[in-house]
Amino acid sequence: MIVNPLKRLLKLYKFLKDPVQYAKDVGVKVGHQSKIATLDFGSEPFLIAIGDHCHITKKVKFITHDGGVWVFRKEVPDLDVFGKIEIRNNVYIGNNSTIMPGVTIGSNVVIGANSLVTKSIPDNCVVAGIPARVISDIDSYKQKIISKNFKTKGLKGSERRRIILQKIDELGIRKDFIKP
């Protein structure tokens, strides 16, 4: 029983030390200049490939098999179904998103937080939702988001806070009310 907690601590230590190296150690193929902030690469991490300049945020889950085959195991004891996951270049995957087996995510893609990606995503788009669907092309998103630039990247502490508080009402993200 002590072995499992020790394995978990070692896994966490490796992740905190270098998350990209941890991903590679468990079998994920990772390209250049990618950032990773998740530990959840499923039971077949060797089926996952992440391209160059990708950002995989916290609690993103990769599922590489169809666990639903369980209901057929009495009938077909050796039944197992798998799918590769390929993430091409320049991709951002938001917090708590889940990527299902067999999915390819094209280049220049943004996936919104809490999305469930059940189908492959073409290049140059923004997707979000459950299930994820295209909500914008990447160029339209860029134009919209540039107009909200606080210009604080690289600033730290009180200077960053001061600028954000000064500009939040002018530049901050605002959502429409849900219609009754």
Image (spheres, rainbow, N blue to C red):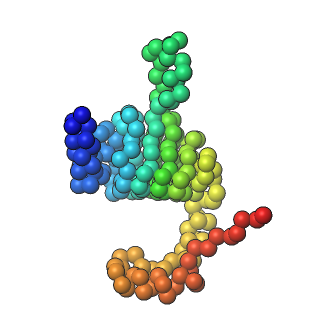
Among all residues in the image, which is located at the extreme right? 180
The image position of residue 153, as x and y in percent, is 40, 75
The image position of residue 96, as x and y in percent, is 48, 52
Question: What residue sits 21% from the left and 42% below the top?
Answer: 6
- Taking depth in this image into account, of 73 and 86 the one nearest to the observer is 73
- Taking depth in this image into account, of 109 and 73 the one nearest to the observer is 73
The image position of residue 120, as x and y in percent, is 56, 42
Among all residues in the image, which is located at the extreme front? 1
Query: Residue 123, can we see it?
Result: no
The image position of residue 67, as x and y in percent, is 49, 29
Question: What residue sits 46% from the left and 38% below the top?
Answer: 63
Please give left or right for residue 110 compared with residue 44 in the image.
Answer: right
Question: What residue sits 58% from the left and 73% below the top?
Answer: 173
Give above or below for 1 relative to 147. above
Give above or below for 120 relative to 90. above
Which quadrant, please, contains the C terminus?
bottom right
Among all residues in the image, which is located at the extreme top? 75
- Taking depth in this image into account, of 169 and 121 the one nearest to the observer is 169
Question: What residue sits 24% from the left and 34% below the top?
Answer: 1
Total number of numbered discs in the rendering: 0
Query: Residue 60, can we see it?
Result: yes
